[in-house]
Image: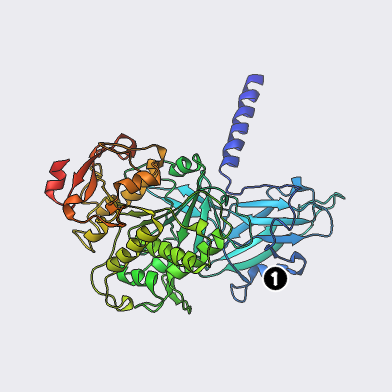
Amino acid sequence: MKRFLKVLGFLLGLLLLIILAGCTQSFQTTSQENSENFPDAVSIDLNKITDIEKGQLAINLPEYDVSTIFSSTFSKPIQYSSLSGNVKLIREDNNSSEEIEIYLSSDRKTIYIKPIFRFIAGNNEVYMKGLKPGLTYKIVISPYIRFDDNSTLGIEKVFRFQTKNLDYGIYWFSPDGKAEKFVPGRANAYFNPSKPSVIYLHGWEKDTTIRDYFREDPYFLITKTIKNVNTGQFWTNKNYNIGVFYWNQFADEGEVKDAEAKIWTYAGPKGMRYRLSNGNYVNLNVSKSVSDLAFECFSQNFRSYSGSEIRIAGHSLGNQLATVLTWKIHKAIESGTLPSSVMPKRLVLLDPFWSKGEKSYLGNKWTGEVARQYVKELISTRRIAVEMYKSSMIGGILVGDENEEMKGMVAFYRLWADFIPTTDQAEQHGYAVSWYFWSMAGAVNGDTYKFGAAVDSNTIKSMMNWDWANNRPVSSSSRRMWYTEGRGNTTPTPLDDYFKVKSGVSTWSEDDVVSR
């Protein structure tokens, strides 16, 4: 009987651990926190909230940004051990609990409720948990909160609010999948202004908003062909801040050219409209393009920056945003509105896409043509390293502008994802992102140089098709060099790859395939 009770006790304890491990709420208190740590916290007066408001419709509710931190002050000091499990943040449309951290002020009378963003492993993708735009939430304070005099709150308090319809900006990541949006004037747990930094800019995001505001995470890889690779850890191990500029609601258009226009102008075919999770579009009445908004966020985030390097990486359509953003930073430094310390040292174009055809908003020039002009100016005046990685036929032989002239200035690399079927061009298209962020794990071997994110900027510059002595592109196509993946192309990891140096103009042809 005793043995049975021991086994039963062990099983019950194990069950409790499993249940606790599955909880979505994170609880954290500290007696060291005070209002100076959260100067922009929104104070909610729970004493003015009645039971009747629990059934209130989602009209005339206060609206807050998804990054908002909430606070509530009580008349007596709180026993912080009583907070665990007694403060909840609930999404009303599906009644799910959101992950939060709870802090206590130094006098223990004020609690701070901080919503947490975290990327979770799903089927063939990573999805984000956390507050999302245009939804109704409620903060629930249990009646069992206990004070120092051993009395309890005695009644459940509920505060209901809506999140604003639009969210964009720079999110900084921890190596374990947490993310925190940059908010001016607020310390960010995952951004240190004295560390080197990389910012990723995603591309076209058709129909992602209606998938519960799906967002990319380049720092944790789960795809159809890659499983559970924490690329962010490779970067944070080398002391990098790792970030993403999200513009997914603007980028969610049925036609890629409509999303493309927003990078360059606020007066394109669809203006600056953005999408909601119900599929509807809302017009944002601003005289700013997406690149203007990105530059605004960057300027606020990096104004006091002292790190050794800023690296800007853009994928697909996002390569255009990365280019325009870097050019705007250059012009701001030139005009004296930003310090030279924030000039990116490296621009990374990952399986880039430029659409074909003249654009009225660019004086009838192609987007690739203007991007090329910007890159040429950036190299010649700022001497930055520019690298371009091609992993699919998207943006070239299938659709889009091959932009051979761009290849004739930058360091150009051909990736061959032979472990992905040629028919799955979307998966091959995304592989450039996977390869690049994964390559920070170690320099990739080749005939003449080392390759990838882990090598320094000077090595990239030595591989660029740029005549540094005369500060211009190489004089002829015969002098152009490019680099093709010669081995390791049957596995996802870049660490077994080996690159061969090639000369002349690169095309996506059978000759290139055979030449490997």
Q: Position of residue 375 (x, y in %)?
A: 34, 61
Identity of the residue drawn at 12% across and 48% down: 510
Q: Position of residue 195 (x, y in %)?
A: 54, 47
Element class at badge 1: helix
**Quadrant into which the N terminus falls:** top right
Image position of 446 (left or right of 213): left
483 to 9, vertically: above or below: below
Residue 190 or residue 54, whichever sits in front: 190
Color theme of the render: rainbow
Image position of 132 (left or right of 206): right
Whether residue 255 is visible, yes or no, is: no
Q: Position of residue 12 (x, y in %)?
A: 62, 33
Identity of the residue drawn at 25% across and 44% down: 417
Image position of 147 (left or right of 446): right
Identity of the residue drawn at 52% across and 56% down: 341
**Which residue is outermost to the front?**
469
Hey, what amino acid is under mark 1? Answer: Ile
Image position of 20 (left or right of 426): right
Residue 435: image quadrant is: top left
Residue 405: image quadrant is: bottom left
Residue 409 or residue 111, whichever sits in front: 409
Residue 220 or residue 262, whichever sits in front: 262
Query: Circle 1 sits on which residue?
Result: 52
